[in-house]
Image: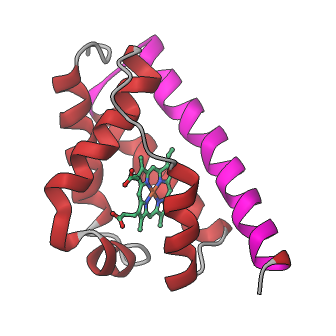
Amino acid sequence: MRDIETKEDIDELVKLFYDKLFEDDLLKEIFENTVRDHLDKHIDLVSQFWDSILLDIFEYKNNVIEKHISADRLFTLKKREFDRWLLLWKASVDELFKGEKAELAKSRAASIADLMLYKLEFIRKTVQ
Ligand code: HEM
């Protein structure tokens, strides 16, 4: 099994991950209601985000945390949701790739998820 090396590898990974999200009993409702109507555009942005982390290709310009503050207002995102999201991300990586970048994809996702959850909980507590 090979490691993640190209933008095409990341596109493949993100697509597999979204197939899993849309089949997941806990998360599918969130994604059906937020990204289904612009799924291709969304997948492009998520792929760009991972290109910047894994391949040093810096096309992604948005603020990823802000996007989740908006999502959190519609569907409160708690540890349970983040744990499931991470489980599916890790399963997608392991299904397709093995190596240093594959490990980085999983460890970075875990630390970003931790930070996001912390920020969302903080905002929920402090902003009415
Ligand atoms: C419970 C976990 C999560 C849920 C339910 C979730 C859900 C969402 C939603 C609803 C959007 C907005 C889509 C839109 O309106 O266009 C989004 C965008 C995005 N998410 Fe997540 N997300 C989660 C965790 C994460 C994590 C941990 C990461 C990164 C490691 C991540 C990366 C992204 C990226 C890159 C975007 C695109 C933002 C943009 O439009 O520029 N998500 N997510």
Q: Can you say which quadrant of the picture contains the N terminus? A: top left
Relative vertical location of residue 25 with respect to residue 52 in this rendering, above or below: below
Residue lying at the far right of the rendered structure: 126
In the drawing, does residue 112 fall left or right of residue 2?
right
Q: Which residues are magenta?
A: 96-125
Is 109 a magenta residue?
yes
In the drawing, does residue 89 fall left or right of residue 36?
right
Residue 35 on image: x %, y %: 27, 68
Is 74 a magenta residue?
no
In the drawing, does residue 44 fall left or right of residue 118?
left
Q: Nearer the viewer, residue 47 or 62?
A: 62
Residue 92 on image: x %, y %: 33, 42
Q: Quadrant of ligand 1?
A: bottom left
Residue 66 on image: x %, y %: 56, 59
Relative vertical location of residue 28 with respect to residue 12 in this rendering, above or below: below
Task: State which quadrant residue 124 falls in.
Answer: bottom right
The structure residue drawn at horizontal position 56% and vertical position 81%, both measured from the top left corner, is 73
The structure residue drawn at horizontal position 51% and vertical position 48%, both measured from the top left corner, is 63
Total numbered labels: 0
The structure residue drawn at horizontal position 78% and vertical position 79%, both measured from the top left corner, is 127
Task: State which quadrant residue 14 falls in.
Answer: top left
Which SS type dominates the magenta stretch?
helix
Does the image show residue 75? no
Q: Nearer the viewer, residue 7 or 45?
A: 45
Q: Nearer the viewer, residue 43 or 24?
A: 43
Relative vertical location of residue 126 with respect to residue 22 in this rendering, above or below: below
